[in-house]
């Protein structure tokens, strides 16, 4: 019988370090030098901690998969082509990025923009968990399958869970397409239309 992957010592150390951070600034400071994933630490330029509103609790959080090349270069989340499309769709939906926390499941860019490994997601989970605890967003938009699985479980099928809110630890979690899928399938593709529809629905719950 195959055993599921276990939380290893590096993941446990990240979880302990993150849980001890009293506020966002302290958490960001201890996350930036993280070397829990040796392959990612060796190839990254920045740990992309994420962006938070200038003041107060975010109205909602956007949680993607992992940084891409532009994010790794700048140290900021969703600033490349996917981020630019996301910004446009947020405006169309009636949402203000300045009121959102913008985060990723994995904080370092995987080489070649590959999908993060299960071990990398596990080791990075402590950072995201503590971010959500500190920021306490009432609504989370999980962008793409990796993010949806983080919130809703490893057997999540995006087509089956999107379009409605899921209660996760007292938060409304909406799973939807990643902006990169919207780019890949083009302006008339299902992912772009679905992402815009889901963001519009989220905006309606925040009104």
Image (tube, helix red, strand yellow):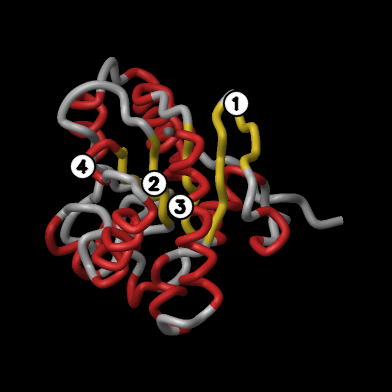
Kindly identify which residue carries mark 4: 32
Q: Is residue 117 visible?
A: no
Going from N to C along the chain, the mark reached first, 1 or 4, is 4
Please state which of residues 79 and 70 is positioned toward the viewer in this rendering. 79
Going from N to C along the chain, the mark reached first, 1 or 2, is 2
Say which residue appears at 54% left-offset and 65% top-offset. Answer: 194
Rendered location of residue 78, percent (x, y):
27, 58
- Residue 169: which numbered mark, if any? 1
Say which residue appears at 47% left-offset and 68% top-offset. Answer: 115
Query: From this viewpoint, which residue is outermost toward the right?
Result: 1
Check the picture and name the quadrant holding the C terminus.
top left
Give the label, 4 or 2, closer to the camera. 2
- Residue 199: which numbered mark, if any? 3
Say which residue appears at 56% left-offset and 61% top-offset. Answer: 145
Disc 3 versus disc 1: distance between alpha carbons?
Answer: 21 Å
- Residue 189: which numbered mark, if any? none
Kindly identify which residue carries mark 2: 62
What secondary structure is found at the residue carrying circle 3?
helix
Disc 1 versus disc 2: distance between alpha carbons?
Answer: 16 Å
- Local packing at callout 1 (Cα closer than 10 Å; few below 14, some 14-19, many 20+) is few
Give the label, 1 or 4, closer to the camera. 1
Going from N to C along the chain, the mark reached first, 3 or 1, is 1
Rendered location of residue 62, percent (x, y):
39, 46
Give the label, 3 or 1, closer to the camera. 3
What secondary structure is found at the residue carrying circle 1?
loop
Please state which of residues 169 and 204 is positioned toward the viewer in this rendering. 204
Disc 4 versus disc 3: distance between alpha carbons?
Answer: 30 Å
């Amino acid at each position: 019988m195959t055993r599921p992957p276990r939380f290893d010592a590096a993941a446990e150390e990240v979880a302990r370090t993150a849980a001890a951070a009293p506020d966002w600034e302290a958490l960001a400071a201890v996350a930036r030098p993280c070397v829990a994933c040796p392959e990612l630490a060796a190839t990254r330029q920045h740990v992309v901690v994420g962006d938070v509103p200038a003041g107060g609790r975010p109205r909602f959080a956007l949680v993607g998969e992992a940084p891409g090349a532009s994010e790794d270069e700048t140290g900021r989340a969703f600033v490349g082509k996917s981020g630019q499309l996301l910004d446009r769709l947020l405006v169309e939906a009636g949402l203000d990025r300045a009121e959102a926390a913008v985060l990723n499941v994995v904080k370092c860019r995987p080489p070649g923009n590959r999908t993060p490994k299960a071990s990398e997601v596990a080791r990075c989970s402590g950072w995201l968990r503590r971010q959500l605890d500190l920021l306490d967003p009432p609504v989370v938009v999980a962008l793409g399958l990796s993010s949806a699985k983080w919130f809703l479980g490893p057997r999540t099928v995006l087509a089956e869970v999107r379009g409605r809110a899921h209660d996760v630890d007292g938060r409304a979690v909406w799973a939807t397409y990643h902006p990169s899928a919207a780019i890949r399938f083009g302006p008339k593709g299902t992912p772009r239309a679905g992402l815009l529809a889901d963001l519009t629905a989220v905006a309606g719950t925040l009104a």
